[in-house]
């Protein structure tokens, strides 16, 4: 079986991590395939939402540790540059909404890949753990960037140093994710939201994403300039015209993503 399953359903790309016997831990082949699929999603105009989940009982347990037993420090640095950094960079710059549907444990880079997505949902039974310190590493894949911004410095510091397991409901309370769904309704409810996103004005969603990326580091003044620029661009899309027309005609808009 391929380590990544890829299917499209209407305008949604569904990417499933698929090494369930290893809790969907990433070996090199899987990481490169994931990168390739994200690039495909960027380039295929018919895809208007990306939905990422895992097979079996895990979202992902991060790096496959059986693959790095002989690695020296320099090699680990190369793994980040070749695999994880491009993945989280692409997740943040992909011009479509990316949903992380965290169906089970999300550990190490698996947790931080989820944090790099636009909207994070989790099953009631899922949990998150920054396991890195337990094996003498530091959080990577953007974790030291996203986690303090989501949950605050103090909680991020504790989560990263202690590597505690955080239930999805605690993660939601801390601001690490958007919503928790019961195990039985998880797939149905999260796919419903992905369908909704795939029918929305895709370019506007992409610009919201870029504006938020800038907002993490901009001053208020700089951010107002970003809003000026992107609002102008949004107003030049076909979907904006359709949105206003539909509102005035008191009907549902039919957005095309253009
Ligand atoms: O090169 C570099 O290291 C740089 C990149 C770093 C990025 C990283 O992600 S570093 C962090 C790597 N991940 C971890 O440290 C997590 C390791 N896994 C765990 O701590 C636990 O497995 C979990 C907390 C995720 C889940 O625990 P539990 O009790 O539900 O499952 P388990 O029994 O530990 O695991 C089930 C199987 O999956 C088991 O195999 P077996 O005994 O049935 O044959 C286990 O070895 C395997 N597995 C789980 N995680 C990994 C893994 N195999 C390889 N790599 C893993 N990360």
Image: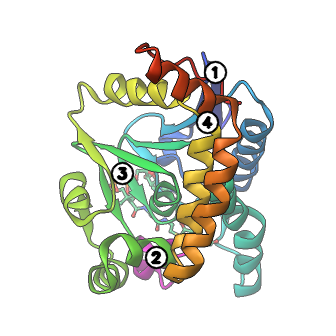
Q: Which of marks 4 and 3 precedes in the sequence? A: 3
- Is 80 placed above or below 258 here? below
Does the magenta run of residues contain 223?
no
Residue bearing the label numbered 3: 105
Badge 4 element: helix
Q: Nearer the viewer, residue 70 or 223?
A: 223
Q: Quadrant of residue 165?
A: bottom left
Q: Which mark is residue 132?
A: 2
Label 1 or label 4, whichever lies nearer to me, is 4
Query: Between marks 3 and 2, how big is the CA–CA gap?
Result: 14 Å
- Ligand 1 closer than 8 Å to label 4 CB: no
**Residue at 30% from the left image edge and 81% from the top image edge:** 162
Q: Nearer the viewer, residue 242 or 29?
A: 242
Query: Which quadrant would the N terminus be assigned to in this image?
Result: top right
Residue bearing the label numbered 1: 8
Query: Between marks 2 and 1, how big is the CA–CA gap?
Result: 33 Å
Q: Quadrant of residue 166?
A: bottom left
**Residue at 32% from the left image edge and 26% from the top image edge:** 189
Q: Which mark is residue 43?
A: none
Density class for disc 3 (Cα within 10 Å; few <14, some 14-19, many ≥20) is many
Badge 2 element: helix
Q: Is residue 14 visible?
A: yes
Magenta segment: 131-144
Query: Between marks 3 and 1, how big is the CA–CA gap?
Result: 25 Å
């Amino acid at each position: 079986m391929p380590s990544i399953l890829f299917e499209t359903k209407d305008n949604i790309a569904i990417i499933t991590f698929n090494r369930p016997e290893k809790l969907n831990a990433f070996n090199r082949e899987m990481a490169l395939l994931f990168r390739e699929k994200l690039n495909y999603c960027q380039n295929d105009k018919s895809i208007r939402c990306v939905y990422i989940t895992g097979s079996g009982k895990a979202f992902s347990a991060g790096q496959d540790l059986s693959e790095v037993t002989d690695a020296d420090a320099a090699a680990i640095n190369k793994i980040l540059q070749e695999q994880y950094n491009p993945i989280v960079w692409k997740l943040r710059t992909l011009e479509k909404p990316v949903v992380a549907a965290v169906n089970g444990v999300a550990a190490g880079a698996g947790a931080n890949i989820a944090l790099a997505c636009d909207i994070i949902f989790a099953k009631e039974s899922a949990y998150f753990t920054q396991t890195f310190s337990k094996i003498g590493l530091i959080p990577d894949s953007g974790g030291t960037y996203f986690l303090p911004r989501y949950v605050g410095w103090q909680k991020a510091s504790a989560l990263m140093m202690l590597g505690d397991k955080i239930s999805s409901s605690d993660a939601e309370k801390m601001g690490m994710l958007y919503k928790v769904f019961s195990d039985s309704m998880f797939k149905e409810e999260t796919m419903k939201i992905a369908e909704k996103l795939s029918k929305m004005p895709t370019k506007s969603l992409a610009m919201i994403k870029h504006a938020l990326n800038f907002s993490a580091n901009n001053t208020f003044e700089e951010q107002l300039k970003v809003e000026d620029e992107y609002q102008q661009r949004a107003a030049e899309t076909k979907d904006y015209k359709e949105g206003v027309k539909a509102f005035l005609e008191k009907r549902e808009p039919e957005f095309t993503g253009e």
